[in-house]
Image (cartoon, rainbow, N blue to C red):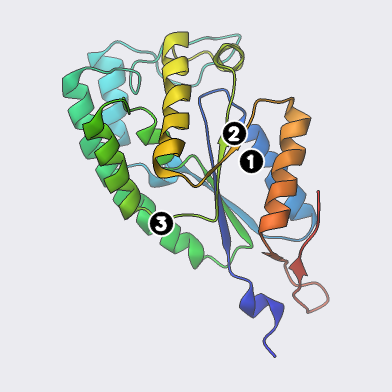
Amino acid sequence: MPSPASVVKTNIVSFSGIDGSGKSTQIDALRDRLKQEGVEVKVIRFWDDVARLTSLRESAGHKLFKGDKGVGSPEAPLNRRDKNVQSWPMSGVRLFIYFVDAISTRIAVNKARRSGAGLVIFDRFIHDELANLNLANPANRAYARMIMALVPRLPIHYLLDADPEKARARKPEYPLEFLHFNRNAYLALNRLIGGMTVIEPMPIADVTRTIAGHAFSRLSFRTQPRNGNNSTLNVTA
C-alpha cells in the first residue's frame, strides 16, 4: 500500500483582494498554523516571483504619471499611479503585460506542483491583475476569459472582500474611488469566471478562523517526517 506521502499531492491556494484587505495577515496566519502542525509551506509573492516587466510598470507609474513609489502606511500615505490609470494607451500596455504574466503564472503553478511542499500559497494571483480592468466592457470580459483559459485553476482561490474605506485606512496608496472600482471588479470577475471563495468582511480573528476551517475541510496536507515517518493532516479549525 502506498504511503500517505506518495498519495497526497502538493496543495496550492491563492489569496486575492484590494490593497489593505488583509492578505498578508491571513497568509501569515495560515502558514504559521500549518508549520506548527509540521506541514512544509512555501509562499510565492506574485509581484516578486511571477510578474514580469515590473520595471516597466514601476517607471510608467513614477516617471510618466508622477506617482509615488513604495508601500503606503497610515503614517506615510502614498499616491501611486499605475494600475489605477485607465487611459487607453496604458490599458493597451496592460493587456500585453497581463498576457505575459499569465504565461509566467502557468509556469509558476507547474513548478509549485513539483515543489514537494505540503502547501504552496500564492500571495496574489492573475485575478489581481484582471480586477484592474473595466469588466463592464465586453472586450475586457472576453480577454479575462481568454487569460483564465491559459492559467491553471487552483483548488482554492480566496478573495478577501473588504470595505474600501477601512482598507485604505490600513494601506493608503490608491484613491478611494479606485478601491471601490477595484472591489467591484473582483466581485464581477468571480461572477464571470467563478471558482473564487469570497470571504466577507469580518474582524481579523473571524477571517482567520473561517479560512482555516475552510482550508482544513477541503485539503489534506502532507506533514514533514517525524521519527522517520510521514503522515497526512486532516484537522478542523
Nearest the eye: 159 or 174: 159
214 sits to left or right of 164: right
Tell me which label, 1 or 3, sits earlier in the chain: 1
Measured along the vertical axis of the image, is residue 64 above or below residue 127?
Answer: above
Residue 47 seen in the figure? no
Q: What residue type is labelled 1?
A: Ile
Residue 5, compared with residue 193, is above or below; it is below
- Does the residue at mark 2 contact the one at mark 1 (Cβ under 8 Å)? yes
Q: Residue 9 at x, y = what percent?
A: 59, 69
Residue matched to label 1: 27
Q: Is residue 150 left or right of residue 45?
A: left
- Circles 1 and 3: CB distance less than 8 Å? no
Callout 3: helix, strand or loop? loop
Q: What residue type is labelled 2?
A: Lys
**Separation of disc 2 and disc 1 at Cα?**
6 Å
Which quarter shows the N terminus? bottom right
Q: Farthest residue in the bottom direction?
A: 1
